[in-house]
Image (spheres, helix red, strand yellow):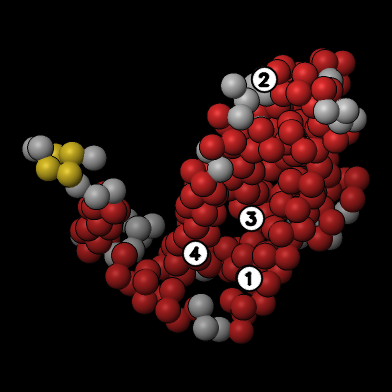
Amino acid sequence: MTLFGRRIPMSASLLLWAALWEIVGRAHLTILIPPLTEVFARLAEIVPTEGFAESLALTARAYLLGSTIAIGVGVPLGALMGRVPLLDRLLLPWVNVFVSAPLSALVPVIMALFGFGETTIVLTVVLFAIWIIMLDSRAGTLHVSPSLDEMAKSYGATPLQAFLKIHLWAALPEILAGVRLGLIRAVKGVIIGQLLVSVVGFGHLFEIYSSNFLMQHMWALLLVLFALAFAIDAVFAWLERRFDYFAAARQ
């Protein structure tokens, strides 16, 4: 980003928004937006507490389980969609529907089928994450050059060997992009699950803070979630840049 011919780091925008947040909070225009400095003060208070540690453990477990299932199922299934036309025609309409659908409306259906326990929260995480992973994995394998298939056949590779050792690796940039977007959507999924299904983990903390109008505490908890999503995005964006050279193998 440049301003008046000078390069401005992207972090400057965060500082600008932080300053505006502090100004609005100090002006006391609404109780919903407390000063940012007070939010950070509450963050320093609640993070070392036992209740926060327990809530974080519950949320992290559901998030990791759901994300692992979404990646473990979504990547191979999406990659197969890109290589098997019949499977693609069967699944692609549904994948497109779920990518654009309001998934929160489907949570009560999962609750009716699986109850109010952790299983439903994990499935909610899967529901939010898996579709974009499948779609991007499909896009990656669709762009694999047919010459790679010819090379695999000339060396006597079986279809399974070609899929595992060529197609998945050649599609890696898109797969990583889908995983990155899926994991970010999974953060939303685990919080919605813990708010709508069974009020546990961070959902329990959100319920306490919002019902008692503890806006500073609630914003502090939101900052933790924003930081988690930002860290996931940054790590996988770095991985995408590291593995970009695999895209050249598809030409």
> Is 52 left, or right, of 134 in this rendering?
left
Q: Determine the secondary structure under disc 2.
A: loop
Residue 97: x and y in percent read: 71, 24
Which label was assigned to residue 224? 4
- In this rendering, the label closer to the viewer, 4 or 2: 2
Q: Say which residue label 3 marks.
A: 191
Q: Which of marks 2 and 1 is nearer the N terminus?
A: 1
Q: Distance between the residues labelled 1 and 4?
A: 10 Å
> Of 248 and 111, which appears nearest the observer?
248
Screen quadrant of the C terminus: top right
> Of 34 and 19, which appears nearest the observer?
19
Which label was assigned to residue 129? none
Q: Which of marks 3 and 1 is nearer the N terminus?
A: 1
Name which residue type carries label 4.
Val
Q: Which of marks 4 and 2 is nearer the N terminus?
A: 2
- In this rendering, the label closer to the viewer, 2 or 3: 2
Which label was assigned to residue 145? 2
Q: In this view, does 16 lie above or below 102?
A: below
Q: Answer with the quarter of the image where residue 40 lies.
A: bottom left
Q: Say which residue label 1 marks.
A: 56
**Contact (CB < 8 A) between labels 2 and 3?**
no
Residue at screen point 59% across, 68% down = 205
